[in-house]
Image: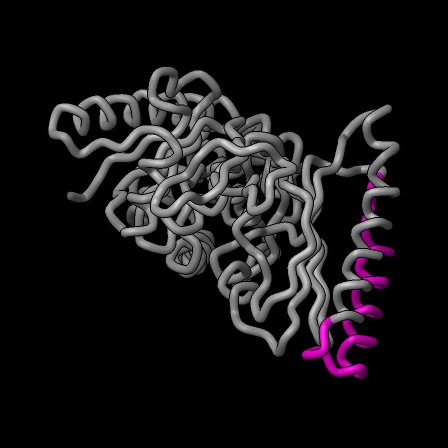
Amino acid sequence: MDPVLSSEVLAKLRRPRPYPAVSLVMPTHRREPDNTQDPVRLRNLLAEAEKALTADPDVPRERRLDILDQLGRAAAEVDLAHAEDGLVIYAAQGERQVWSLPRTVPERVVLADTFLTRNLVAARAAEQPYWALAVAADRVSLWSGDPERAREATRDGFPLTRGLEDPDAERKERVGDLPSTFQDEATRQFLREAHEKLRVVLSADPRPLYVLGAAEALALLEELGPLAPDAVTVRHGGLADGPAAAVHTAVEPSRAARAADAVRAVASELDAARGRREFAGGIDEVWRAAKEGRARLVAVEDDYRTVVREEGDHLEPADPADPGARDDMVDEIVERALDTGAEVRFVPGGALDGQGHIAAVLRY
């Protein structure tokens, strides 16, 4: 899986391809004994994709062979021993991608002129991704994190590094043998460069930001100007080189507190919208609002999934075996809402009791 599922990556995935762009989607399992079924399920899906490609008269032979080769190569790259909750494989002429998701997905094979991205879009929204900037006098690193982990992001010039005139300067500073490195003009210029590069990242992929460093490093960054609205500083030095687990641990209390505040804010917004008659509750009402672009905020319980079928302008509960049954409607609603500029927030299971597990604040 790409270490950073960014807005730019999603935009590239959603571009049209020469037909067919093949999407294989399947749930996976993290632990035994459930994960023993995953290799068999993957082989069956690959066979289903080959059958669909062979039977489609609109797929030229040369393109079919290329895509089958891409699917085989992608399958060889899959690491089911370290699977999460969902697997997505994309294959088109001359390209392939493999994504492991910390969110369950429905099983399907789709041939179209675009990749099926709604599961990735919903997974990214549910992940609540953040950026963490870890600052030292000789290194500034960028980390992409979520509630489960953090990983270093190497992009847009990060990490920034430089040599110190005295390679032992920071150790001496800690024991009081050297004036603060952060009073040095070269250090100010170094952090100013990091400041500017971070603005590029946040402009391309806005996320909550956590800034980690010793008190003097944080103070100097504040002097250079605000990094982002609502950026949270974490007074914890020594993390510019990681490790990733330590960065995640340092950020987690602040991230969890922010997430709890956000859940309370969503509940308040939904209550106020109900009073203004700008509220939609339940999958049928929210689906129609998202389709029509009327949703301003969509809230979804993070474990909510349901099987429905379309009956005219409404959704009705369905059995998975019913013709036309849809088991990814929640993900489709999330994708459509984001496409129309709505905010999407995932909340803990049970947070929307009495509201159909999914609700929306309407624009009108």
- Between 10 and 360, the residue placed more toward the observer is 360
Q: Quadrant of the C terminus?
A: top left
* Residue for point 71% across, 36% down: 84
* Residue for point 78% across, 75% down: 64
Up the image or down, 337 lies above or below 145; here it is below
Left or right: residue 37 compared with residue 356: right
- Between 28 and 141, the residue placed more toward the observer is 28
Start-end of magenta stretch: 56-80
Magenta segment, prevailing SS (helix, strand or loop): helix
Instruction: Determine if the magenta segment contains residue 344.
Output: no
Up the image or down, 286 lies above or below 256; here it is below
Where is residue 334 shown, x and y percent of the image?
A: 43, 44
Q: Quadrant of residue 24?
A: bottom right
Q: Quadrant of residue 170?
A: top right
- Between 266 and 153, the residue placed more toward the observer is 266
Where is residue 183 shown, x and y percent of the image?
A: 41, 45
* Residue for point 29% across, 44% down: 289
Where is residue 345 shown, x and y percent of the image?
A: 39, 35
* Residue for point 63% across, 43% down: 151
Left or right: residue 93 compared with residue 105: right
Up the image or down, 94 lies above or below 100; here it is below
Left or right: residue 97 compared with residue 327: right
Where is residue 308 shown, x and y percent of the image?
A: 50, 37
